[in-house]
Amino acid sequence: MTTRLLKLAGIDVSTLDQRCVILSEGCPACMPGETTFTTQVIRLNREKGGGDEPVSAAVN
């Protein structure tokens, strides 16, 4: 579903990496009947002095 939303928004998925956060106001699966969703991609900056190692995070 995410790839489909990105393609509909005109966002090239090959340009995304682990620093990208995808925000959407909804999706066809969670909001049946809706046909328009605002989708944004935000690329986070690397931390100063940090390497390329990913950092684990807990999600509730």
Image (cartoon, rainbow, N blue to C red):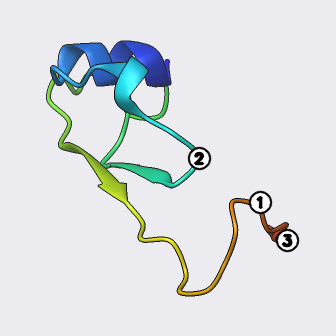
How many circles with numbers are drawn on the protein? 3
Is residue 12 shown above or below 27?
Answer: above
Location of the C terminus (image quadrant): bottom right
Q: CA distance from mark 1 to mark 2?
A: 8 Å
First in sequence, mark 1 or 2: give its number. 2
Q: x, y (%) of residue 38? A: 17, 43
Q: Is residue 28 in sight in this rendering?
A: no
Label 1 close to label 2 by CB (< 8 Å):
yes
Q: Residue at x 38, y 12 (%)?
A: 4
Q: x, y (%) of residue 1? A: 49, 18
Crowd band around label 3 with a 10 angstrom C-alpha radius: few (<14), some (14–19), many (20+)? few
Residue under numbered circle 2: 18
Indicate the secondary structure of the residue bearing disc 1. Answer: loop
First in sequence, mark 2 or 3: give its number. 2
Residue under numbered circle 3: 58
Q: CA distance from mark 1 to mark 3?
A: 13 Å
Q: Residue at x 44, y 17 (%)?
A: 3
Indicate the secondary structure of the residue bearing disc 3. Answer: loop
Is residue 4 shown above or below 20?
Answer: above
Q: CA distance from mark 2 to mark 3?
A: 16 Å
